[in-house]
Amino acid sequence: MSKDNQILEEFTSKEYEHGWSVNYEADEAPLGLNEEIIRWISAKKEEPQWLLDWRLKAFRAWEAMEEPEWANVTYPKVDFQKLRYYSAPKQTKKPKSLDEIDPELLAIYERLGISLNEQKRLQGIAVDAVLDSVSVATTFKGTLAKLGIVFCSFSEAVKEHPELVKKYLGSVVPMTDNYYAALNSAVFSDGSFCYIPKGVRCPMELSTYFRINAANTGQFERTLIVAEDESYVSYLEGCTAPQRDENQLHAAVVEIYAGAHAEVKYSTVQNWFPGDKDGKGGIYNFVTKRGICAGDHSKISWTQVETGSAVTWKYPSCILKGDNSIGEFYSVAVTNNMQQADTGTKMIHIGKNTKSRIVSKGISAGKSQNSYRGQVQVMKRASNARNFSQCDSLLMGDRCGAHTFPYIDIQNPSAKVEHEATTSKIGEDQIFYCNQRGISTEDAVALIVNGYAKEVLNQLPMEFAVEAQKLLALTLEGSVG
Amino acid sequence: MSTLVKEDLFENLLESAPANFTEARQTAKNLYLKSGLPAPKEEEYKFTGITKKLEKSLDNYNQANQLSVEENLIKESVFQGFEGDVLVFSNGKFLQEMSSTIEGLEVSDILSSSAEIGSIAKAEKDAFAALNQASFSGGISIKVPKKTKIEKPILLLSFNGANDGQVITPRFWIEVGDFSEVTFLDQSISMGEEAYFVNKVVEIKGGLNSHINYYRLQNESNQAIEISNIETDIQSDARFTSVNISLSGDMVRNNLSLNLLGSNSEGNMYGIYLLNGKTHVDNHTNVDHTIPHAESNEMYKGIFDAQSRGVFNGKIFVRQDAQKTNAFQQNNNVLLSDDAIVNTKPQLEIWADDVKCSHGCTVGQLDEEALFYLQARGIGKVQAKGLLLYAFAGEVMEKIEEESFKNHVVGLIQDRLGSKF
């Protein structure tokens, strides 16, 4: 036991490696939230009237809503009047290419290991980098444009493709969907927009990198992905934030629309600053992510690796509206120290012969709390719906908790729904077995955890899988159950 | 928290509460008045709109008076093959003169007993538990002394029906001493077709190494609304087994809680719900592992036909000190009709790391191939289906150790499924 404690101690004293911040000149909105601020943001971004009206409508709805308290997390409430809703790196004019971007900004991304320049040269991933509130650079735009693919920042999309934005914005996550979605609808500053035309298979992985830099800033980005009939896209999202003592709010909305026979794969590696070992600081990650399989035979797949954030509140969902559509959710959520995560998914079966699969692997260590909360709903006309859910929890240390709250609501007699969950710790016999064969305890833990999470990690695109595995090994360094 | 839907729904009931256990009643009354009946969206009653149901189905919220129960009625009502002692209740009130005297037991009306009201089924946990504690007007206190084995099962036979009022509030206190053994069968008979509301609380206290079985059969009329809070505390080496069979009713909600307070204790909760018509049955179970080395098993099986609805919420709570816990939970459901609904939520809350906990939950249909196999051997479709459903439910029925009760339940289920050959 004492050895366990010692190792745990070692492990909990590990620092967050992306905890630095950079001073750069920023354009900032005044603190607080009111209609004026929303008008200010909208004017700053030179938005059309309809979007301002939409924001104001969302704001009024938000004012009438109450902060949800049902999640299995506790945290000091956010004072929405003490936050800054817009912060942008100062740029005198819009950059035409990467060469014109402030080298300081590029340096930030270099440090994160996301070299925008590198990306430019190497074939592989198109990156849209979002710093605080605005998108600073998007790579590979030209190559994509030739195929008719639109991949740009949200504000650019509002200007250049207003008809698309107007059609799909809020169609999957209505502005009044929940407290944080309404807040985001009112104040969202930027994000990524992606449109894949009919019959196009996106040749490269699209990626967005989010970073919160400024203090007292909330990040409210909005991502909209539209995949028309028979198209395919794989989308990656990554995020980090500097180490600060106060909590920062991240309330994003991601909407995905998939037409008939379209497939969208959305992968996230979330590594926001989790707070220090006493739970001081860290990001509140209150995110609404939802996709709709609108057409027949469409497919949406969510894969997430959650390692960061002080408090996570996130349920990537699929609405399976089209007949024979498929929804998938693969998740590894690791919590350590004082982190709290309440995460899971919703699979709403509306169309016939729809299928969904949920694989959730929770790992809790330190004094953290890790909850899986999911819903599988089979509507009355969704005949032959099929769902399989598996949520496993691994506990390391005796001060952490693992909880499961699966809701299963079935209204069709032909549905086949299975749910299973287990909770356990790494067995001493497993460790002993590895030790016997010359594998150190630490490596053995990494080995076992990686094996445990493999089902999910396998779903990640190659580039991300490497990062995720590294992150997992790092987060759990030295921890023995 | 919840908002009061209709403050004065049970005002008369609270006013007319008997004048004993005043302290316990007052505490509970305050709690109830503070919380009120569950609001429509309250998580614990999310799928069971009990408040609305009570408002709609009842028009008299007064305590129902005692019904006249004759010797013959009791004889007719006891199921075939039963050999044991019968304790009779009429609208919740204990009829001592009609009941058997059981050797070795200390039995008395709850109103004149020394029961520790509210010490196990806590009023703050549930609005209806509070309402019962504030207003209970009858019931029983049963104490099994130490080292006593009650050989024959005890049938708690309740006759329920509306008369001057439609509310029935029984309360049972059962205390089983160290090293003692007892089996209870809890059954209610509906008198008349008018709607009534039973708000029942059962508190069970199991001593060291005690063995308690509590079997319950719910087949009241389809006008009956019932809420029950059954809570059990057991000590080291004790074993508690509950089997709950729900076959009918209008809206039924069972809150079954089990607190494992001593190491090496074992708690088992089993249930079948076989529903048709518009019956709505909601089983909420809660196992609280407070100490190391305890075990709990749970298995609920549901078969839903017509417009019936089944709700299951099973919670396993493993506290930080409860290392080496083994906890298993299973909920399987079969939907037979387009209008039936199932809402299930098997929940785990684990705060200790050295545990083995698992839960499984399924919703599905009968295996087509198994059906075909039977049909190919000359068994008609209806019968084959009945046979398979019977086998599905059989796993739970096997848990009943009391033979005569098991046979009775098997008969009822076979009748319902048409699987009698």
Image: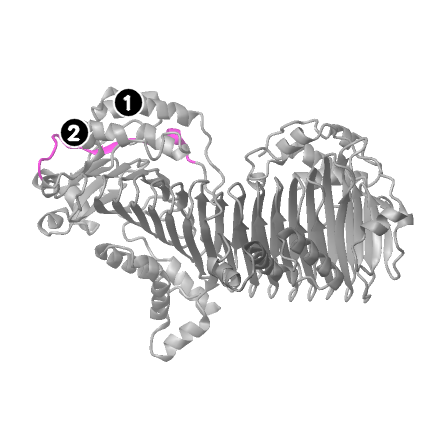
Q: Position of residue B114 (x, y in %)?
A: 84, 49
Q: Which residue is disc 2 drawn over? A: A160
Q: Establish if A149 lies above or below A34.
A: below
Q: Is B232 or B162 nearer to us in this picture?
A: B162
Outermost residue, front direction?
A: B378
Residue at the farthest right position = B97
Which numbered tag is attached to residue A52?
1
Residue bounds of the magenta highlight: A78-97
Q: Is residue A156 left or right of residue A401?
A: left
Give me the residue at 42% from left, 43% from top.
A382
Pinpoint residue A115: horizontal percent, then vertical percent: 15, 49
Residue drawn at x 53%, y 62% is B374
The circle on residue A192 is: none
Residue A41 in magenta? no
Query: Given the image, on which type of amino acid does mark 2 rest?
Result: Glu
Q: Give how far across and how far down residue A384 sits, in percent.
A: 42, 48
